[in-house]
Image: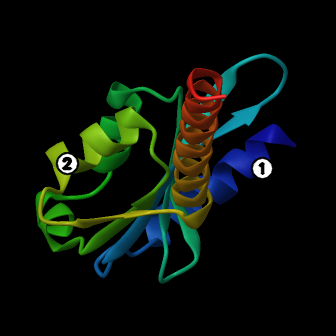
Amino acid sequence: MHAIVERAVERGLQRRQLYDVRHLGVDEKSFGEGHDYVSIMTDMDGHRVLEVVPERTIESCDLLWKTLTETQQSEVESVSMDMWQAVMTSAEKNAPQAEVVHDRFHVSKHLNEAVDKVRRQENRRKKRKKELWP
């Protein structure tokens, strides 16, 4: 059964056309137990997975980019990603012209953390002020 799947994937890869890849997504996913990760590159317009590699390091992200030709890399207009440093570093190195688009979840998370930090600081400041001036 495994050999049939491998042959089907091989045929699909041979027929795959990557000539018009403008908007990419790069993300990491955990699988199995523990901290096993893969890095994934997707064609956001074509709604398809372009490549999957083990790990979530800069080197693994660079491997994703190597599946595209230099011309294809230079034509990428945007890369959607979370705020994982390996993904950001690799995208900047391999497609410096591309606009980075961070996903809403992570932007909201950082915004909420910043608002919470300021709220706590203000609360401590008001408590100290109250202690000084009864």
* Left or right: residue 75 compared with residue 87: left
Could you tell me residue 44's position as x and y percent? 49, 75
In the image, residue 59 lies at what x, y percent? 33, 27
State the quadrant of the N terminus. top right
- Percent coordinates x, y for residue 47 in the rendering: 58, 77
Q: Reply above or below: 89 against 46.
A: above
Q: Write down the residue under mark 1.
A: 4
Give the amino acid at mark 2: Glu
Seen from the viewer's position, the closer of residues 95 and 15 is 95
Three-letter amino acid code at disc 1?
Ile
Q: Place residue 75 in its image quadrant.
A: bottom left
Q: Is residue 111 left or right of residue 75?
A: right
Q: Nearer the viewer, residue 127 or 103?
A: 127
Left or right for 97, reference 112: left
Q: Secondary structure at mark 2?
A: helix
Marks 2 and 1, how far apart in space?
38 Å
Numbered mark located on residue 12 in the image = none
Image quadrant holding the C terminus, namely top right
Determine whether the residue tagged by mark 1 lies in a helix, strand or loop: helix
Quadrant housing residue 116: top right
Q: Where 33 sits versus 110, above or below?
A: above
Counting from the top left corner in percent of width and height, residue 103 is at 52, 63
How did the renderer colour the structure?
A: rainbow
98 relative position to 37: left or right: left
Q: Residue at x 24, y 71 (%)?
A: 76
Camera-side residue of 62 and 16:
62
Camera-side mark, 2 or 1:
2
| Residue designated by label 2 | 92
Quarter of the image holding residue 80? bottom left
Residue at the spot 19% in from the left edge and 58% down from the top edge = 69
Q: Earlier in the sequence, mark 2 or mark 1?
A: 1
